[in-house]
Image (spheres, rainbow, N blue to C red):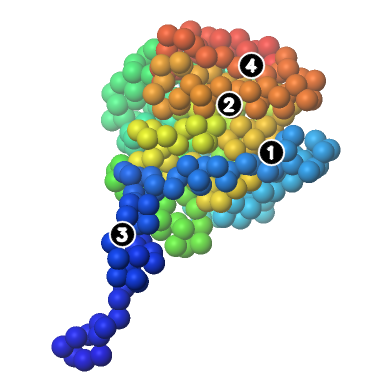
Amino acid sequence: MSAGDPLGRRAFVVGAGAAVLAGGAVSPAEAGVVDGPLPDFHPALKAELNFPLAWGTSPVRDFRAWRRTARAKVEEHLLVDREDGTPYAPRFTRRTQGDGYTREVVTLSLTHHERVRAALLTPHGPGPFPAVLLLHDHGAKFDIGKEKLVRPWYDDTRLASAQTWADTYFSGRFVGDELARRGYVVLCADALGWGDRGPVTYDQQQALASNFYHLGSSLAGLMAREDARAADFLAGLDRVDARRVAAVGFSMGAYRAWQTAALTDAVRATAAVCWMTGLKEMMVPGNNTLRGQSSYYMLHPGLPRFLDFPDVASIAAPRPMLFFNGRLDPLFPADGVRVAYDKLRAVWHSRHAEERLHLKTWPDLGHVFVDRMQDEVFSWLDAVL
């Protein structure tokens, strides 16, 4: 090696295999061809995913033991430690009266790293009340988080943005306020990156997630831990009947809802609107998941070697769960929804609890949570809680 030839005669080969070393041409099959965001061998990778820890496939045959084993596997892949010893230390401020309920901002510690602000709505009356942990969506809109679901009485500058979001996805309603009027305590907090904890930009999400991984942690794992802690906090409030706590969400919020139910028994019922699918059926060319970016909020590296999405949700069985999907939803192919629903149905059937699982595909709807869907969810919550 010389100063004029710093690499000497060494060859650096990337993705070319033995053909380059032999001096021959490289065929597409020999090279590491990438088709858009998918490697050319992605079908082989998919074929290797058989989800060996899923109920019915797992060698663990006792359901309670399986739940413990599966939950431990999920927790292992969150890459974020539990926060059982961190005091919530809630501080309640900005109290005002709504239409049949009281509104407050509560600031609390969901982890030992930072304090988080949440909207807390409490119906008028003596209580204790049933309660809903309300989990906001992604939507690539970061200036509002909890304000997507609870009318922001504390910040007029966000009201126009929040109302536009409600008009687009929720028939103009603020779902949290509707639930409070119906007699539910409602807690809704910002996930990292939204509202008071942001806003990030769309293109910053991947870097944010990467930096978490470099720091030995996980963006998706943090969100999962915070949501579980929020559910435990809500269930522990004196105004709440801990036997009647639900998690409810739309889109990414739906993912968060069933994930939270899998991680904590504080959630006694779950309504997940527009987020359930089989992983392999979702990862097809053109699907939004393949872009990266927003998918990092729902990515636990290595977990699919053990469990599919419906397998994780099934950890909450046989508690009541509702899943809605729109047949026109471009984010979740019909094959993926069908695979997931079949898996869920089999688990609840094995527990003789089919009546506790409500699965529905709305034939004329896409990725929305409109008023008629809400009304059915509200009635279902009234029945199961």
Q: Which mark is residue 358?
A: 4
The answer to whether marks 4 and 1 mark residues whose Cβ atoms lie closer than 8 Å is no
> Residue 46, relative to residue 241: is it above or below?
below
How many labels were placed on the picture?
4
> Residue 251, relative to residue 193: is it above or below?
above
Q: Quadrant of the C terminus?
A: top right
- For the residues labelled 4 and 3, the Cα–Cα distance comes to 53 Å
Picture residue at 56% right of the left edge, 39% below the top: 227
Q: In the visual, does 96 lie left or right of 30?
A: right
Picture residue at 31% right of the left edge, 30% below the top: 158
Which of the two discs, 4 and 1, sits closer to the camera? 1
Sequence-first tag of 4 and 2: 2
Q: Quadrant of the N terminus?
A: bottom left
Q: Is residue 117 visible?
A: no
| Local secondary structure at mark 1 | loop
Where's residue 259, x and y in %? 59, 36
Please give the residue where the numbered disc 3 appears in the rendered image.
Answer: 26
Closer to us: 299 or 112: 299
Which of the two discs, 1 and 3, sits closer to the camera? 3
Picture residue at 74% right of the left edge, 41% below the top: 58
Sequence-first tag of 1 and 3: 3
Q: Amino acid at mark 1?
A: Ala
Q: Which mark is residue 54?
A: 1
| Local secondary structure at mark 3 | loop
- For the residues labelled 4 and 1, the Cα–Cα distance comes to 20 Å
| Local secondary structure at mark 2 | helix
Please give the residue where the numbered disc 2 appears in the rendered image.
Answer: 339
- For the residues labelled 2 and 1, the Cα–Cα distance comes to 13 Å
Q: Is residue 42 visible?
A: yes
Report crowding for label 4: few under 14, some 14 to 19, many 20 or more residues within 10 A (C-alpha). Answer: some
Which of the two discs, 4 and 3, sits closer to the camera? 3
The answer to whether marks 4 and 3 mark residues whose Cβ atoms lie closer than 8 Å is no
